[in-house]
Amino acid sequence: MFVNVLKSKLHRVKVTQAELNYVGSITIDEDLMDAAGLLENEQVHIVNNNNGERLITYVIKGARGSGIICLNGAAARRAQVGDIVIIIAYAMMTTDEARTHKPTVVFPDDNNRLVTV
């Protein structure tokens, strides 16, 4: 049997842009992607702490060191610049793997820069 468990998350990052007229996705600073083990085109769940919105989209690489967190397309309607979001990735694994799996949790600073992993 396989279960879907938390793989990694970017905890409390700030939305820096929202681009409505763009093909849907979320653009994430490549440094943050690396720290959380996120891959380009990987599915992620976005939870908006400011308004309670939740959505599913996929990752696009943003400029390394830029701190960019940009909701694109329809997702741009779910957040405003300055909102705090949590970006969550899950992984399928066996129940035995899940029992010992340790997710990666990244806690960036107020400018979306790496502080603690």
Image: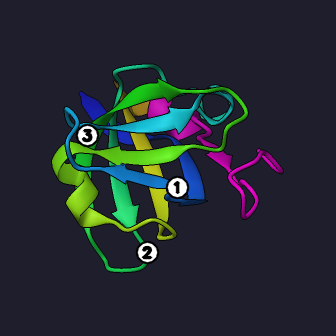
The image quadrant where one finds the N terminus is top left
Q: Nearer the N terminus, badge 1 or badge 3? A: 1
Label 3 to label 2, Cα distance in Å?
A: 17 Å
Name the foreground residue: 32 vs 98. Answer: 32
Percent position (x, y) of residue 22? 23, 36
State if disc 2 and disc 1 touch (CB < 8 Å).
Answer: no
Say whether residue 26 is magenta. Answer: no
Residue under label 1, please give it.
16
Residue under label 3, please give it.
57
Q: How crowded is the residue under tag 1: few (<14 C-alpha within 10 Å), some, or many (20+)?
A: many
**Mark 2: which secondary structure?**
loop
Label 1 to label 2, Cα distance in Å?
A: 15 Å
Q: Residue furthest bottom?
A: 51
Which region is colored magenta?
97-117
The image quadrant where one finds the C terminus is top right
Q: Of the residues shown, which amino acid type is indicated by label 1? A: Thr
Residue under label 2, please give it.
49
